[in-house]
């Protein structure tokens, strides 16, 4: 089980129900935790929660964004967490496959070199395409074009377009993030935060599909 989390660390509120009596509950989970224990206050049934491998930091940050929108009504912070979720997953997958490539004898994973390579992309649009090229051998636009399910999801988005995905993620998710963090503009509405949340959700689904594709390669 996890140790006591740091005092000022990010915690993600997760909501679920007791398996025995159905009592709703909420737990604040530290980003580094992979499991947690809780006891239902109504029927005293103990529970253990264990996250699957698909519950990554990016997924938890995205859930944090949902909480900020629905419960805290902090729409600017929701936008920040949505962008963090997508960029976190983008970087995680790049580092994951770089590390896997170093499993052969005589090779060693260099975390600092990975970080330097990610910083070298300069813009988020270049980072998206650079990570895509490394993962699946093509840019994000070409990968999504090759997948009918992903094309359909993008077609239903108000902000994203097949053929312009890296630029559209940058403009419609990361520019609002920068407006909050760089310029202190916190005057965002529910609709604006929800749009960024949806963009990040679609981005995470594309990255997940890329990861599955890479895992299927011989």
Image (cartoon, rainbow, N blue to C red):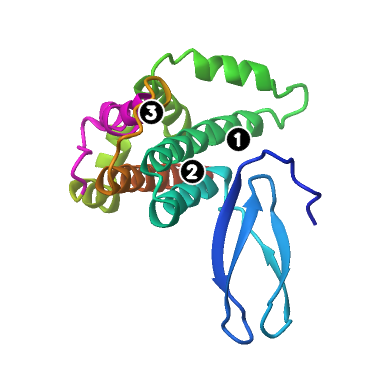
Image quarter of the N terminus: bottom right
Question: Residue 97, located in which quarter of the rendered image?
Answer: top right
Label 2 and label 3: CA atoms lie apart by 30 Å
Question: Residue 127, located in which quarter of the rendered image?
Answer: top left
Q: What is the x, y in percent for residue 39?
A: 72, 74
Q: Residue at x 27, y 27 (%)?
A: 171
| Residue picked out by circle 3 | 180
Labelled disc at residue 201: none
Q: Residues within 10 Å of mark 1 (few under 14, many from 20)?
A: few
- The answer to whether 173 is drawn above or below residue 33 in the figure is above
Query: Label 1 near label 2: C-beta < 8 Å?
Result: yes
Labelled disc at residue 96: 1
Labelled disc at residue 211: 2
Q: Residue at x 34, y 23 (%)?
A: 125
Q: Which of the pair 203/69 is nearer the observer? A: 69
Query: Residues in magenta?
Result: 157-180
Q: Residue at x 21, y 32 (%)?
A: 163
């Amino acid at each position: 089980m996890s140790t006591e989390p740091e005092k000022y660390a990010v915690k993600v509120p997760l909501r679920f129900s007791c398996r025995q009596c159905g009592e709703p509950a909420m737990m604040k989970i530290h980003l580094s935790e992979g499991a947690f224990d809780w006891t239902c206050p109504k029927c005293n049934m103990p529970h253990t929660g264990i996250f699957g491998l698909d519950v990554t930091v990016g997924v938890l940050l995205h859930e944090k964004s949902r909480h900020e929108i629905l419960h805290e009504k902090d729409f600017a912070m929701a936008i920040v967490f949505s962008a963090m979720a997508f960029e976190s997953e983008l970087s995680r997958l790049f580092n994951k496959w770089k590390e896997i490539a170093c499993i052969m004898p005589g090779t060693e994973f260099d975390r600092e070199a990975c970080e330097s390579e990610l910083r070298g992309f300069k813009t988020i649009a270049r980072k998206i395409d650079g990570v895509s090229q490394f993962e699946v051998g093509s840019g994000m636009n070409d990968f999504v074009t090759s997948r009918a399910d992903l094309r359909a999801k993008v077609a239903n988005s108000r902000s994203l377009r097949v053929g312009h995905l890296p630029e559209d993620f940058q403009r419609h998710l990361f520019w609002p993030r920068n407006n909050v963090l760089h310029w202190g503009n916190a005057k965002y509405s529910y609709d604006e935060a929800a749009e960024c949340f949806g963009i990040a959700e679609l981005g995470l689904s594309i990255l997940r599909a890329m990861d599955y594709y890479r895992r299927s390669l011989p």
